[in-house]
Amino acid sequence: MEMDFFNRGDLAYIPQDVLLYRVSGDHRFGYVKTEKPTVAVILEELNKNSNDCCIFAFGGKFAVNKNHVYSMEEPHVG
């Protein structure tokens, strides 16, 4: 799902074996790999030219490739 469908504060599903890069300001340092599916909170899109978004998970701020972020919300049909 494209990031355009997410809003700040939305819950997101992150699958197992996805790399999450720690973020502090504009810097990335270290990473964790999800050992099991994880629920995260969407914080922001990092850069319009990037394929990453910023999430809150495991008590911290992480960058993750948008291709590994899935909505926890039911699609609205209307």
Image: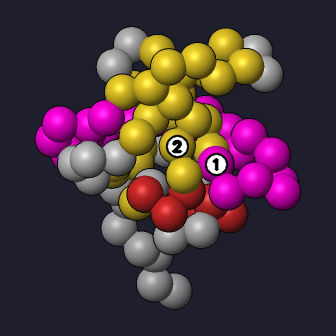
Within the magenta stretch, is there residue 49? yes
Residue on which the image places disc 1: 52
Query: Is residue 76 toward the left or the right of residue 72 in the image?
Result: right
Q: Look at 22% across and 48% down and name the residue there.
A: 16
Q: Which residues are magenta?
A: 33-52
Q: Look at 51% across and 70% down and name the residue there.
A: 1
- Residue 2 place in picture, x, y as percent: 59, 68
Q: What amino acid type is highlighted by mark number 2?
A: Val
Look at the numbered discs 2 and 1 and tell me whether their residues touch, using CB distance below 8 Å: yes
- Residue 14 place in picture, x, y as percent: 33, 48
Q: Look at 31% across and 35% down and name the residue there.
A: 33
Near-viewer residue (8 or 27) = 27
Q: Residue furthest front?
A: 30
Q: Look at 34% across and 19% down and name the residue there.
A: 58
Query: Is residue 30 toward the left or the right of residue 74 in the image?
Result: right
Q: What amino acid type is highlighted by mark number 1?
A: Asp
Secondary structure state at the residue bearing disc 2 = strand
Secondary structure state at the residue bearing disc 1 = strand
Q: Earlier in the sequence, mark 2 or mark 1?
A: 1
- Real-space CA distance between mark 2 and mark 1, rounded to the nearest whole angstrom: 5 Å
- Residue 17 place in picture, x, y as percent: 26, 47
28 to 17, vertically: above or below:
above
Q: Can residue 70 be seen in this snapshot?
A: yes
Residue on which the image places disc 2: 64
